Amino acid sequence: MRTAVVVGNPKPASRTLSAASYVATQLTGAEPDLIIDIATLGAAVLDWSDPEVSDLVRQVGEADLVVVASPTYKAAYTGLLKLFLDRFAGGTGLSGLAIPLMLGGSEAHSLAPELVLRPVLTEIGGTVPGRGLYVVDSRHDDPSAYADWLAATAPIVSRQLGVLS
């Protein structure tokens, strides 16, 4: 089983990255096989002929589980994440489970993962088990901020990943 984390925070090594890695580890019991902090790719993310970014897209597409994470910007995910996800057009889609995760400053945007990120992940081929996850960014390092979601979603993920094995 291969697990990937894709983070669209413009700030490298962000709280969003920490949260996404935590979720992936909690769902699988292991560190993710692939972590893509899109901010570290620089201008290459804009170049559709860049071989490194193309290979990362391929690897994410082949992952059994991918956690796709973004901070909430203007009630949506970041343009940086959109640039990366746009690469999945034209038949190059996700083949496994996709977890939409968004962080924000308050509960005011708690539906953002369901309303803006989930539809994109399903459009590019991902299967979203359960509901999307929203975490208030000041609680990104508090396990209790994830506990209810993990209790509801981890069993679904385990069953679906078991079918893939």
Image: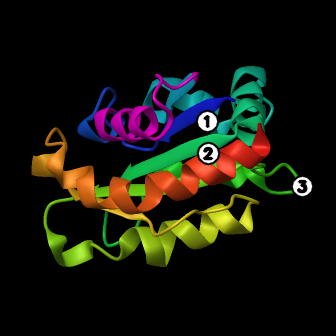
Q: Give the labeled residue for mark 1.
A: 45
| Front tag of 1 and 2 | 2
The foreground one among 1 and 48 is 1
* Residue appearing at x 79%, y 52% in the figure: 93
Is 158 drawn above or below residue 102 in the view shown?
A: above
Q: Earlier in the sequence, mark 1 or mark 3?
A: 1
- Which quadrant would residue 15 be assigned to in this image? top left
* Residue appearing at x 31%, y 70% in the figure: 74
Any mark on residue 91, and which?
3
Any mark on residue 65, and which?
none
Any mark on residue 84, and which?
2
* Residue appearing at x 18%, y 53% in the figure: 145
- Which quadrant would residue 46 be assigned to in this image? top right
Q: For the residue carrying disc 1, how many other residues have a C-alpha within 10 Å: few (<14), some (14-19), or many (20+)? A: many
The amino acid type, in three-letter code, at marker 1 is Val
- List x then y, in percent, for residue 48: 76, 38
Q: Which region of the structure is painted magenta?
A: 18-33
Q: Is residue 2 magenta?
A: no
The amino acid type, in three-letter code, at marker 2 is Phe
Looking at the rendered image, the quarter that the C terminus falls into is top right
Q: For the residue carrying disc 3, how many other residues have a C-alpha within 10 Å: few (<14), some (14-19), or many (20+)? A: few
Q: Earlier in the sequence, mark 2 or mark 3?
A: 2
Looking at the rendered image, the quarter that the N terminus falls into is top right
Q: Secondary structure at mark 1?
A: helix
